[in-house]
Amino acid sequence: MADPHQLFDDTSSAQSRGYGAQRGPSSLGYPAPSPSSQAAFLDDPVSNMAMAYGSSLAAQGKELVDKNIDRFIPITKLKYYFAVDTLYVGKKLGLLFFPYLHQDWEVQYQQDTPVAPRFDVNAPDLYIPAMAFITYVLVAGLALGTQDRFSPDLLGLQASSALAWLTLEVLAILLSLYLVTVNTDLTTIDLVAFLGYKYVG
């Protein structure tokens, strides 16, 4: 008699309920593989060589993708801009809302490289601008929803237009820096970070 609390039949053993033994490969006309033939397949030098070749191809492909992505999107540099913690975010938001209370505006350097944002409140980051941008788009969607005009297309249009304006602002600043021949250590990512702080307000 089956257990009434068991949800499914146990088909893991060949003898259970008398029907598991009839479904083996030998009952279908196929010879059952012996354990020694399965072990011989794993020990085959051709399969080992194929596995080694496949793993080397995968490693080469990963290296090629990493190198080409890093050329267009400097992921190692982007990690610097997201190196924040909760204390930094609180201090930075206080600085953005009450800038007149802050005295020292210099970015700290250590061996010709700027200190990570979590250690310097003046360092630019991308975490706060990214979260503020997402919040801006969501609040715009909420405002459209309260006016009964919400649609996903309008939300996408809002996000696209905000990104287009941000790109236009970055290009205008880069062009003006080029025209007045100002030498600066600001990178394009720094400009995106500084211009992205406007979404906090």
Image (cartoon, rainbow, N blue to C red):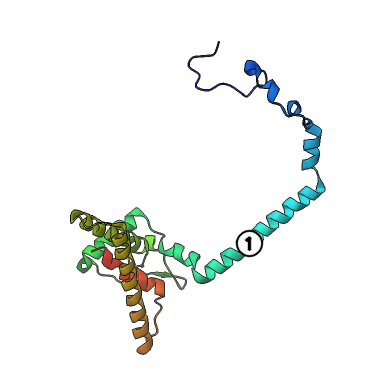
Relative image position of residue 30 (x, y in whole percent): 77, 31
Residue in the foreground of this view, choosing between 2 and 57: 2
71 in relation to 94, above or below: below
Residue that lies at the very extreme toward the bottom in this rendered image? 180
Where residue 112 appears, as percent x and y from the top left, is 46, 73
Viewed as shown, does residue 115 lie left or right of 97? right
Quadrant housing residue 88: bottom left
Could you tell me which residue is drawn at 81 percent across and 39 percent down?
A: 40
User: On screen, 190 above or below 49?
Assistant: below
Q: Is residue 6 left or right of residue 118?
A: right
Give me the residue at 31% from left, 65% from top: 157
Which of the 4 image quarters holds residue 54?
A: bottom right
Task: Name the quadrant of the N terminus.
Answer: top right
Q: Which residue is under mark 1? A: 61
- Quick check: can you spot residue 106? no
Q: Nearer the viewer, residue 71 or 29?
A: 29
**Kind of residue indicated by mark 1:** Gly
| Above or below 14: residue 81 | below
Q: Where is the C terminus found, in terms of image quarters? A: bottom left
Q: Position of residue 183 (x, y in %)?
A: 40, 84
Q: Residue lying farthest front? A: 29
Mark yes or no: residue 130 visible: yes
- Residue 24 in the image: x percent, y percent? 71, 26
How many discs mark residues in the rendered view?
Answer: 1
Instruction: Give the SS element for disc 1.
Output: helix
